[in-house]
Amino acid sequence: MNANPERDIQTFRRALGNFATGVTVVTASDHEGNWVGVTANSFNSVSLEPPLVLWSLNRSSWSLPTYELSEYFIVNVLSDNQIEVSNRFASQGLANKFEDVETCEGIGGAPVLVDCAASFQCQKKYTYEGGDHLIFVGEVMDFHTTDSAGLIYHKGQYAVPEPHPDAIGSENGEETSFVEGYLNYLLSQAANGFERQYQVILDKYKVSRFEWRLLCCISEFQGSNLKQLSKLTIIPEHTLVDVLRDTEAKGWVRNEFDKDGIDHYYIEKAGLDLLVPLTCPLKTVPVIKL
């Protein structure tokens, strides 16, 4: 359908949503050392020589004066398990958005968010008028990158980056390899993709994916020993020992010895109470404004 963007803003917004973007949190510090941070998907590269990037911020943002006056800003590219961080910095009602968020000091005293897919520490070079937004262009003075998958925003919701099936093995006309077309491999890729997305829910309850697997298996197979649980959870025994120790300390499971001195594990009420909301997770609605 064709529409006039000035007359149909909502349709225009939905049309823009067809362009998938990464999700960032841009941070800065004012002259008194107070930190600000906002979620933004307006980040883009501009130049390699010199290394320039840009992002834009709505003029109605209460933190706009800090970004206008600050000489530096930091673009933190969120990884695919940081939806909660994105929602935190997109909200307007939090008194301290940095509470419980791990940071380290960056250029100009601005905070760098830990565990992001990448971060770019920038010196602001230009500010441009952009309608209801201001556009900030910065020169990258330092950066950090990891192998983590970045968080994606597409059609008004979060997504994760996955290779397109038509692109696998197709570069330079190459045929798909045996491994890339092997069902077990593809199933494991799908399982890993699901687990990455589900980790967002687990993070809210401060439960690791190994702890979640363990609680699910013990609740169904009460009294299992270490070897049995290792098979059920697909967790190596040496790793599972640490997971069991942690869950026991949290009061989620308990162990009992049999006559031969072998440990058998049982789920506690606290573990069951935790498992119920994890097996029926509520869908979170992301809040990001263009």
Image (cartoon, helix red, strand yellow):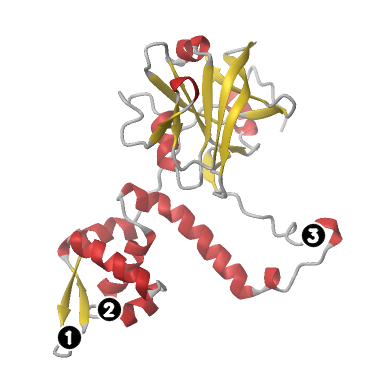
The answer for how far apart the CA atoms under marks 3 and 1 are is: 56 Å
Dot 2 falls on a residue whose secondary structure is loop
Residue at 26% across, 81% down: 225
Residue at 42% across, 35% down: 87
Among numbered discs 3 and 1, the one appearing first in the sequence: 3
Q: Nearer the viewer, residue 47 or 194?
A: 47
Q: Position of residue 276 (x, y in %)?
A: 26, 60
Tell me: 252 left or right of 97.
left
The picture quadrant where one finds residue 181 is bottom right
Question: From where the camera sits, is residue 253 visible?
Answer: yes
Callout 2 amino acid: Phe
Q: Residues within 10 Å of mark 1 (few under 14, many from 20)?
A: few
Q: Position of residue 119 (x, y in %)?
A: 54, 34
The answer for how far apart the CA atoms under marks 2 and 3 are is: 45 Å
Q: Nearer the viewer, residue 39 or 4?
A: 39
Which residue is tagged 2? Answer: 221
Q: Nearer the viewer, residue 66 or 283?
A: 66
